[in-house]
């Protein structure tokens, strides 16, 4: 029997078929469920899909290998020198977490420390192209490897498991240096701890704060100016691995903004476009 209730359902369903596509898309997402990470789509896609990302990562680690060879040759005949060591960051330097970033986009959810900890402890991060080969090469040549990361103590076991599963060398309680509870994000104390015992050949990271604290808490312009002041270190002492997905460069844009609406406005304000002059 074709009841009145059925008639109403047919009318409602049929009306959706004739809605304009943009309006139909709007009906599926309320303002409260706007995807906070949608803006990262291109960056994550570039990291996961582009041959250019792979080429740049390989280029970084090829250069790092050259610098290790040069350092070892320079110190071969010297006595009473400290043994050599390399310091690397973990996330997006040797471990690829782009799948985690992609999941935030696909699910339309915000980052939480609980979700991140769950990901870390699953130990499913992949190797950044070239990182595994470079570190194993260096370790075989007698260079210690220290993984200085701002992952938390509750994430150390997962970090160690992930690195070991992928075959990274010299992974131990000593060499995986996690951020201590109650400390700042600065890595300088841990870097100095390595320097006190070893000759630091290279620092490898995706974030300028992985090299020193000169870049911490500075504006966009000041970070660029600091890069220029330290230009001789890049490619010699510092090796940068590309990471367009996140980093302290974002903090320089956002300042103290915490709400996504304000962050979105600041992202747009930081863009430098072309000012079209009026015609004659």
Image (spheres, rainbow, N blue to C red):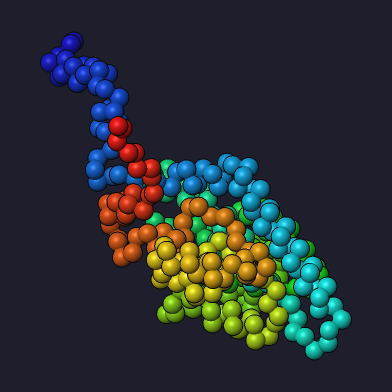
Q: Residue at x 80, y 89 (%)?
A: 80
> Horizontally, is 8 left or right of 19 in the view?
left
| Residue 123 visible in rendering | no
Is residue 110 shown left or right of residue 261? right
Q: Quadrant of residue 217?
A: bottom left
Q: Is residue 111 left or right of residue 237?
A: left
Decide: is 220 above or below 7.
Answer: below
Q: How many marks?
A: 0
Residue at x 71% of width, y 60% of height: 63
Front-lying residue, 19 or 85 = 85
Residue nearest the viewer, comparing 257 with 152? 257
Residue 220, position in %: x, y? Answer: 41, 62
Quadrant of image for the N terminus? top left
- Residue 222 visible in this rendered orientation of the protein: yes
Residue 19 placement (x, y as % from top left): 24, 21
Q: Residue at x 58, y 75 (%)?
A: 177
Image quadrant of residue 2? top left
Residue at 70% in and 74% down: 201
């Amino acid at each position: 029997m074709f009841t009145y209730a059925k008639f109403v359902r047919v009318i409602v369903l049929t009306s959706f078929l004739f809605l304009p596509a943009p309006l139909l898309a709007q009906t599926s997402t309320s303002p409260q469920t706007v995807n906070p990470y949608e803006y990262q789509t291109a960056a994550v896609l570039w990291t996961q899909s582009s041959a250019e990302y792979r080429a740049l990562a390989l280029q970084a680690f090829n250069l790092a290998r050259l610098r290790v060879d040069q350092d070892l040759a320079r110190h071969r005949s010297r006595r009473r020198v400290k043994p050599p060591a390399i310091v690397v960051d973990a996330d997006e330097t040797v471990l690829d977490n782009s799948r985690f970033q992609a999941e935030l986009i696909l699910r339309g959810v915000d980052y939480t420390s609980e979700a991140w900890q769950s990901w870390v402890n699953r130990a499913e991060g992949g190797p950044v192209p070239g990182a595994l080969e470079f570190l194993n090469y260096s370790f075989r040549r007698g260079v210690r490897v220290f993984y200085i990361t701002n992952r938390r103590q509750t994430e150390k076991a997962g970090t160690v498991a992930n690195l070991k599963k992928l075959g990274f060398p010299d992974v131990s309680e000593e060499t995986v240096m996690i951020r201590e509870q109650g400390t700042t994000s600065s890595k300088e104390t841990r870097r100095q701890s390595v320097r006190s015992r070893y000759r630091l050949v290279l620092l490898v990271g995706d974030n300028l704060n992985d090299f020193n604290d000169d870049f911490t808490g500075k504006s966009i312009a000041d970070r660029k100016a600091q890069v220029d002041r330290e230009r001789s270190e890049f490619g010699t002492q510092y090796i940068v691995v590309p990471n367009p997905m996140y980093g302290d460069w974002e903090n320089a844009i956002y300042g103290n903004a915490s709400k996504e609406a304000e962050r979105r406005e600041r992202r747009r304000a930081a863009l430098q476009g072309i000012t079209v002059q009026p015609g004659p």
